[in-house]
Image (cartoon, rainbow, N blue to C red):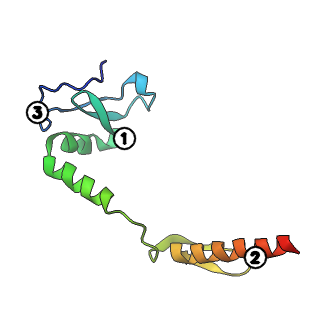
Amino acid sequence: MSYRPDPDNDLNEAYAVIPMPEELRGPADWWTVTRTGVPVRHYSPQAHDLAMRFATDPTYRQQLASMSANASPDWSRAFDDPITVPDVHVLKTLHDAGHYAKGRAGAGRVADRR
């Protein structure tokens, strides 16, 4: 299998969904979306419909691209399972965990200086 781009192909028509090529060393039952022969995205066996949608729907591809470009962590989103730490704190969000880790790192540096 060749992964060389074909400049004669219209990029909107050049997408294909193929089984994961062996040379990519990925899970054999996964799907690979290629654009002009170049792998651009991989999907699990259960997501074949999403792979087909990615290959055939330019609006969907644009939506995914804009979502990943604007992605930033939501520091206030609650964890599915709060984390209890030894000093009786319960970390409920990424914000809590960051502050806890920052405080622990500072405490470690003070102890090392003694």
Q: Dot 1, crowdedness within 10 Å: few (<14), some or many (≥20)?
A: some
63 in relation to 73, above or below: above
Label whose residue precedes the other's in the sequence (2 or 1):
1
Q: Which residue is mark 3?
A: 10
Q: Residue at x 64, y 74 (%)?
A: 102
Which residue is at the far bottom? 88
Identify the image quadrant of the C terminus.
bottom right
Residue 102 falls left or right of residue 80: right
Q: Which residue is mark 2?
A: 107
The image shows residue 11 at horizontal and vertical percentages of 15, 36
The image shows residue 57 at horizontal and vertical percentages of 14, 46
Query: Which one is in front in this view, the residue at disc 1 or the one at disc 3?
Result: 3
Q: Dot 2, crowdedness within 10 Å: few (<14), some or many (≥20)?
A: few
Label whose residue precedes the other's in the sequence (3 or 2):
3
Label whose residue precedes the other's in the sequence (1 or 3):
3
Query: Which one is in front in this view, the residue at disc 2 or the one at disc 1?
Result: 2
Which residue is at the far top? 1
Q: Residue at x 25, y 27 (%)?
A: 37
Q: Which residue is mark 1?
A: 44
